[in-house]
Amino acid sequence: MQLRIGYAQIDNNISAKPMFQAIMFPKELFMKRDKALQSKKASQPSSEEASLEIKEFFNMHITTRLDDPEVLFFEEIDFLVQTIVLQMDDEFIGYIYRFTDSLNTNITSMHDIFRQKISNSIDEDLLEMENLFSH
């Protein structure tokens, strides 16, 4: 199985005139496409154009073994991610902070149903221990 993503970019649409238009983009692909566009505008095909091969932004390849249908066995998992440029101004960071603060949850917290089951289980274990040692 293979997954390829040719290009990925996250734009900054929070305000009308952001400091950075793109928050995230692949560095090498951006530079190579910029060079290719400049050479096309100058309409001078150069020898560099042949070397401007644009590789995928993200490429993942998974090899599985199929000898035993009962077992899912990944023999090899390879992935390649190009260098990524992240650009964020203080306004964007403020939006991220307010968003995460509005979630008001603890990532490591536990759902009440599970907390209750664990609490009941601990209480039962403590009662058993008390009964064992009280006799």
Image (cartoon, helix red, strand yellow):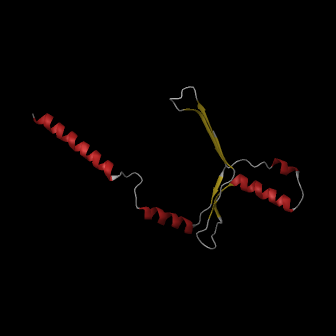
For residue 126, side relative to residue 57 (left or right): left
Q: Position of residue 37 (x, y in %)?
A: 80, 59
Answer above or below: position of 9 versus 70: below
Q: Position of residue 72 (x, y in %)?
A: 53, 32
Q: Position of residue 122 (x, y in %)?
A: 24, 43
Question: 114 and 57: which one is in front?
Answer: 114
Residue placed farthest to the front in the image?
A: 69
Residue at point 59%, 63% (across, down) = 88
Residue at point 84%, 51% (across, down) = 49
For residue 43, side relative to residue 28 (left or right): right
Residue placed farthest to the bottom in the image?
A: 16
Residue placed farthest to the right in the image?
A: 44
For residue 90, side relative to residue 102 (left or right): right
Q: Quadrant of the N terminus?
A: top right
Answer above or below: position of 18 versus 26: below
Residue at point 40%, 56% (across, down) = 106
Q: Quadrant of the C terminus?
A: top left
Residue placed farthest to the left in the image?
A: 135
Q: Position of residue 101 (x, y in %)?
A: 44, 63
Question: 120 and 82: which one is in front?
Answer: 120
The quarter holding residue 35 reads: bottom right
Residue at point 66%, 66% (across, down) = 21
